[in-house]
Amino acid sequence: MTSPLAAVAFAAMAAAALPARAQESTDGARNDGVESVERRTWKLLREKGPSVLSVRVVTHAVTQPRLVLPGVTIAPPGGATERVDASGFLVDANGFVVTTAAAVRDAALVEVRFSDGTVRDADIVGVDAPFRIAVLRTRAPDGATPLSVPDRGTHADMCIAWFFQAAGGRPDVQLARVRAADSRDAAYDRYLYTTQPLLEGAAGGPLLRGDGRLMGMAVGEVRRPATPGDDTSPVTLATLFVRGDDIHRAVRDIVRTGRVNRPMLGIVLDRDTNRIDQLVPGGPAERAGLIEGDHVLAIAGARVDSLTDITRALLRRRIGEPVTLAVDHHGAKVQRLVHLSSMALPPLPSVAPFPGAELRLSAEVGPDGDRTVTFVSVRPNSTLYTAGVRAGDRLMTVDGRSALRFLARHRIHPADARPQTLTIERSDEHHVIPLGGTAATNTLERN
């Protein structure tokens, strides 16, 4: 990490390199040039630096698969502990700290270090996955003043901001040109961004205005992948920041209840489409008269083309709020009034999707966005074994649905008719297996 003096020098050089229009946009304050930037940087370091802290996480040494359904487990991600370094900041005098959700994933031990060298253990209060926010609680030393988290919309025009980080040491700061991201390829579409790379351990660092107000928190990067056959590493295009007002909501809800309680429609969609594959029993959509096979066309008058659009449309709505959905219902466009609600899934079913067999989901998501589903054991006298399924086979589809979609359906509707046809992959070849038949058995055994 650089010293405060080096940070000021960096800020000054960066300010001098900014276009005139950017230099003029500093949250309403007139920019008198490099000296003004230096004074402001020193002031922010002195007043806000004690609020910024480093976060060190030791992860679990996971060696056993985790049960997610009867007969279905998730493979362990690895058998060794790992140390994760990140930044964070104090948001409440009672010791509440904000950092990134990614930093505390699989955490066994969380430790925070304040700018005066004080080290404290911290507990995870809750995590908000859509905003990538984690809230911790610790005991803050005297002099660590909480940052003010805004409860209103964050100004999105291009401006100069100060990005703090404190991984492993004293707070450091960079000057950044910040803009509002206009990409619509993610469920959360309100990111702020800067083209500067995100340094190791800087995720979780706060982004401040010149007056010290919180604009956002660094949560990740956008990278351009390397071209196939090219030995160069992926190129960082931008550092992303979740906005301050969304941090405010997440902190408020997590401190109160341990989670952000968002409303739900109670539907499961086919992948990459708006077709309703299943309804959660008793959920808002079912009560409003939607049925499986309906296609969602618009929410509150706004067109939706994907699950991402639907997620975005519901992200900031309230529990109990009425929302009009336009749907394609048997070829006719109709409207349904849905009252959003907080809801829990039914309890786990007591029966496995495939009696006599155990499935395992890969810990990592593949390039197609799905987890690999593999049979790790098949009982010799089971229906699956008789049909030709063996341990090591990868489950691709069940009755035309993807393996993961079938498992989701079993999670909610375990009493549905038993599967009739499987597609499995073995030795890079796909095989269709009619359950209870013998033709597939002979074919697979010859292969």
Image: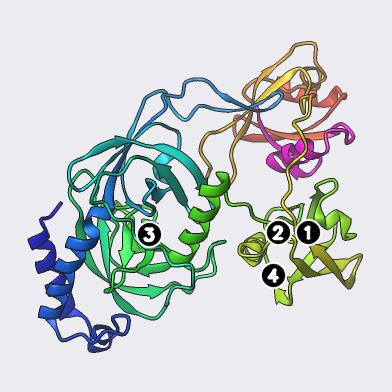
Is disc 3 in contact with disc 2, using a CB cutoff of under 8 Å? Answer: no
Mark 2 and mark 1 in contact? Answer it, CB < 8 Å.
Answer: no
Q: In this view, does 117 lie to the left or right of 420?
A: left
Query: Is tag 3's residue or tag 2's residue first in the polypeptide sequence?
Result: 3
- Helix, strand or loop at mark 4: loop
Residue 94 picture location, percent across and down = 39, 47
Find out whether the residues at labels 4 and 3 contact each other: C-beta distance under 8 Å.
no
Marks 4/1: CA–CA distance: 12 Å
Callout 3–callout 1 Cβ contact below 8 Å: no
Precedes in sequence: disc 4 or disc 3 = 3
Q: In which quarter of the image is the C terminus?
A: top right
Identify whether 51 is placed above or below 44: above
Q: Which residue is drawn at 20% across and 53% down?
A: 171
Residue under the point 40% across and 42% down:
137
Give the mark, 2 or 4, whose residue is nearer the N terminus: 4
Residue for badge 2: 319
Residue indicated by mark 1: 275
On screen, residue 322 above or below 252? below
- Counting other residues with Cα less than 10 Å from the Cα at mark 3, is it few (<14), some (14-19), or many (20 or more)? many
Q: How crowded is mark 1: few (under 14 residues within 10 Å), some or many (20 or more)?
A: many
Amino acid type at mark 1: Arg
In the rendered structure, which disc, 2 or 1, sits on the residue that comes first in sequence? 1
Please report contact status of discs 2 and 4: CB closer than 8 Å, yes or no: no
Q: Which residue is drawn at 70% across and 39% down?
A: 403
Dot 2: element: loop
Mark number, residue 304:
4
For the residues labelled 2 and 4, the Cα–Cα distance comes to 20 Å
Tell me the mark number nearer the camera, choosing from 3 and 2.
2
Task: Report the span colored magenta.
Answer: 393-420
Q: Which mark is residue 327?
A: none
